[in-house]
């Protein structure tokens, strides 16, 4: 027998290291008639803001070689509708539930967290810090260590639940940000968020998405994600949740060897929604073939 369970620090554990990536799996109920969501170690919901958001005008998604660019603009149903319409489904889900939170000010992040932290069916939160901090002139929370520190301290004071912060690769040195998060109370970091990307129609000479520049995801960014995980793993002790271009069991193993305790599947869901079955089978076979009793034993074992 192979043990696929993973401990994320001392706060919680997953039945296996596979989570869904925010924004690629809705709130879980939308795809539950296609995919056995019980196979995942947990679900990370689509980002929630305090009030509903329509997001950016279309076109806001375009396929590119080895990936896709999106500029959805955090379209979501808002906290009230989430609690009214999604809580019953998620309360009965057998895996872990992580709610992704986004905001434009410290106060908005804090208000959302206060509304949600008492819900006993929520196991933790993923904080999207790729949002512009309006009070700081539009600087993204996740690019400035001082701004990030203030936000994490406020959120940590509001909840004892698992708190992971999703880091952007669009920074000078992700290690500084990861160390800041560990020092000021984060339970884990998830990395990476999307990479800046754009595409132009050669006939119309116009950008293929309305916002011109969006976030590139998919297999194209996998090497970038792995490089950032290797950097962060060398300087922090809290768990790293790997994100970025994972589409197979081999990719999962690679991310874990680089230092990820668990991973999130994102863009792959758009073209292979049943990929979880293939990945779990591969993980079991890989462990058996390599005499690995617990998959957690391979975390950070890449010889770098």
Image (cartoon, rainbow, N blue to C red):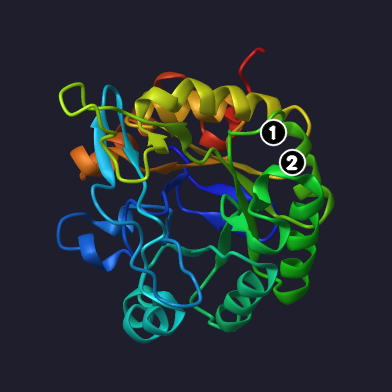
Relative horizontal placement of residue 170, taking residue 180 as reference (left or right)? left
Question: At 33% from the left edge and 67% from the top edge, which residue is drawn?
Answer: 54
Q: Residue furthest front?
A: 205
Residue 75 image offset from top left, x and y in percent: 36, 63
Residue at 31% over, 55% down: 25
Q: Is residue 117 above or below residue 212?
A: below
- The answer to whether 79 appears left or right of 10 in the picture is left
How far from the left and from the top, in percent, is residue 103? 57, 65
In this picture, is 13 found above or below 195?
A: below
**In the rendered image, the vertical position of residue 203 relative to residue 129, given as above or below:** above
Q: Residue at horizontal 74%, vertical 41%?
A: 177
Write down the residue under mark 1: 174
Alpha carbons under labels 1 and 2: distance apart: 5 Å
In the rendered image, the vertical position of residue 85 relative to residue 17, given as above or below? below
Q: Position of residue 156 (x, y in %)?
A: 75, 67
Dot 1 falls on a residue whose secondary structure is helix
For the question of whether residue 300 can be seen, the reply is no
Asked if the residues shown at circle 1 and circle 2 are in contact, with their CB atoms under 8 angstroms apart, the answer is yes
Q: Which residue is mark 2?
A: 177
């Amino acid at each position: 027998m192979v043990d696929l369970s993973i401990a994320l620090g001392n706060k919680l554990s997953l039945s296996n290291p596979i989570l869904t990536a925010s924004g690629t799996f809705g709130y879980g109920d939308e795809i539950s008639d296609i995919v056995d969501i019980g196979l995942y170690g947990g679900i990370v919901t689509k980002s929630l803001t305090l009030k509903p958001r329509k997001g950016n005008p279309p076109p806001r998604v375009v396929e590119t070689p080895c990936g896709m660019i999106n500029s959805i603009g955090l379209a979501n149903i808002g906290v009230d509708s989430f609690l009214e319409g999604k809580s019953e489904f998620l309360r009965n889900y057998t895996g872990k539930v992580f709610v992704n939170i986004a905001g434009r000010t410290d106060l908005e992040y804090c208000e959302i967290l206060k509304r949600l932290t008492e819900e006993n069916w929520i196991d933790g939160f993923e904080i999207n810090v790729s949002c512009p901090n309006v009070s700081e002139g539009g600087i993204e929370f996740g690019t400035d260590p001082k701004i990030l520190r203030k936000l994490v301290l406020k959120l940590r004071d509001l909840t004892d639940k698992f708190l992971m912060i999703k880091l952007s690769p669009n920074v000078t040195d992700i290690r500084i940000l990861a160390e800041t998060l560990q020092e000021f109370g984060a339970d884990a970091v998830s990395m990476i968020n999307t990479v800046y990307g754009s595409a132009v129609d050669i006939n119309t000479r116009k950008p293929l998405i309305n916002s011109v520049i969006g976030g590139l995801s998919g297999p194209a960014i996998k090497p970038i994600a792995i490089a950032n995980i290797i950097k962060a793993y060398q300087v922090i002790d809290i768990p790293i949740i790997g994100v970025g271009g994972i589409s197979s069991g081999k990719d999962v193993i690679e991310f874990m060897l680089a230092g990820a305790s668990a991973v999130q599947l994102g863009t792959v869901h758009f073209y292979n929604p049943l990929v979880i079955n293939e990945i779990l089978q591969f993980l079991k076979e890989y462990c058996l073939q390599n005499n690995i009793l617990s998959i957690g034993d391979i975390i950070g074992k890449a010889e770098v």
